[in-house]
Amino acid sequence: MKKFKELSHQPVEFLEDELERDHVSLTCRQKACLPFWCWKSFIHDKHEAFRFKYDTKALLMVEEELMDGVTRLLYLNSLIYYTIMFLCPVLFLGDCGEGIGSGAHYVYGAFSLLTVIGEIAIVHRI
């Protein structure tokens, strides 16, 4: 609580430097221990998310500039997903006893890869 009170009176740039320094303070030995590195990184990212949650300017920018496009992309993504789920089994169905052809798996794999890339791009933009 004492450290929070000290930091709360500092300019925003100082706070950002303080938080960033906290994230990269791992030694090589600590980075070699994957669970510790992941835990430390996740805790820092959680703090960053809470800091973003209370940043009014950033939230207004997201609402005004990004949400309409993101909403359309989510609806399009859902439409493509359900189209794949209902059509691929029918289109790639093999002869009796063969099951679904590998083409359906390639289509779903490509869709999954593109979805991951899209989500990373959106999160990076936000």
Image (spheres, rainbow, N blue to C red):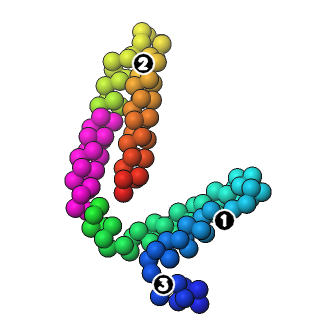
Quadrant in the rendering for residue 37: bottom right
The residue sitting at the top extreme is: 95
How crowded pointer 3 is (Cα within 10 Å; few <14, some 14-19, many 20+) is rated as few
Residue 89 relative to residue 64: left or right: right
Q: Which residues are the magenta region?
A: 63-81
- Answer yes or no: do the residues labelled 2 and 3 have beta carbons within 8 Å? no
How crowded pointer 2 is (Cα within 10 Å; few <14, some 14-19, many 20+) is rated as some
Quarter of the rendering occupied by the N terminus? bottom right
Kind of residue indicated by mark 2: Gly
Mark 2 = which residue?
A: 103
Is 59 above or below relative to 70?
below
Kind of residue indicated by mark 3: Gln
Mark 3 = which residue?
A: 10
- Which residue sits at x=28%, y=50%? 70
Is 107 above or below relative to 39?
above
- Which residue sits at x=42%, y=12%? 94
